[in-house]
Image (cartoon, rainbow, N blue to C red):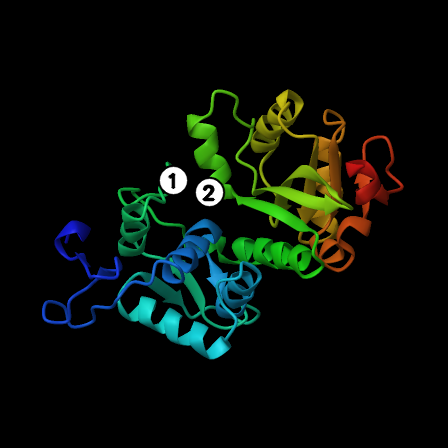
Amino acid sequence: MMLDRILRFGSSGRIRFPMRYFKNSIVIQAERDIPLLRQVHNSKFVSHYQLFELMRFAGSESSGDSFGWRVRRLVKAGFLSTWAGAFGTEGTVYRVTREGISLLEHYGHFTTVLHSNTKHLPHTSHVFHSLELNRIQLALARENLLANWQSEIEVASFNTISCSPYKKDYDAIVDVWLGEKTARFALEYERCLKSYREYDRIRGALQAERQVGWILFLTSGSEVLIHLVHELNPVANRVAFANARDFEQMLLETSVITAPNLAGTHFRELLQ
């Protein structure tokens, strides 16, 4: 059903879903519900705990009980779907639905790569990849280092409409605080190894990149890290490598591998 057929405006300006027409209709609170839906949309997948923490850092939530009630409403109304998940996913995992995307678009939040007419929503095979990126984002936020985080959805959408796009749809474009100044880097999380043909394409993109200084590749383990350094180091002088779990703990003080310094240097030093 088209969204315009079910939305109604109350005197407060809030969009209302009248109870007399729909069994599970709700009043949409633009200042709380829309940022939450947008976060799930941009994350692709996010656990209950991660979503609360992200909303708390964004200033949209402060009470766990209030947050739980809000999420249950959005799930019941069909704007969010749940994935029971497996061990290690920190409980229920959420993904936005087409109805949720339609609601976001009604409020002016549109992306070219994930919209209400997109053929496929994010596949559940991306769950663990998304959850790791959320962990990295939260680790930076907890230490007051995170100035801005552009998700892959936002980066890819920017790339489709910009006259000077990034050469790759990075997993994130991250701005971090270095004292009173900020520094920007592109972030890639490599959970599984790719084919030689895919790495050949990536090498070409990294060589041509001019919109961002450093590209940080974080990996799921040492074997992936070693292989990735071998595949990408010969052609990319502004690429750094480290294990994701090390970065979560050390953040900008993480010792990263680069082409000129295979012994490792602190990531902060590169950004400065």
Decide if residue 5 is on the left or right side of residue 272. Answer: left
- Badge 1 is on which residue? 111
Tag of residue 153 = 2
- Which residue: 50% across, 75% down? 63
Decide if residue 258 is on the left or right side of residue 248. Answer: right
Viewer can see residue 254? no
Residue furthest to the right? 263
- Please state the horizontal and vertical placement of residue 40, each as a whole percent of the image: 43, 56
Decide if residue 42 is on the left or right side of residue 15. Answer: right
- Please state the horizontal and vertical placement of residue 139, each as a whole percent of the image: 67, 59
- Which residue: 60% across, 48% down? 192
Does dot 2 land on a helix, a strand or a loop? helix
- Which residue: 33% across, 46% down? 120
Does dot 1 land on a helix, a strand or a loop? loop
Counting labels gives 2
Decide if residue 27 is on the left or right side of residue 132. Answer: left
Check the picture and name the quadrant holding the C terminus: top right
User: In the image shown, does 265 or 211 lie closer to the viewer?
Assistant: 211
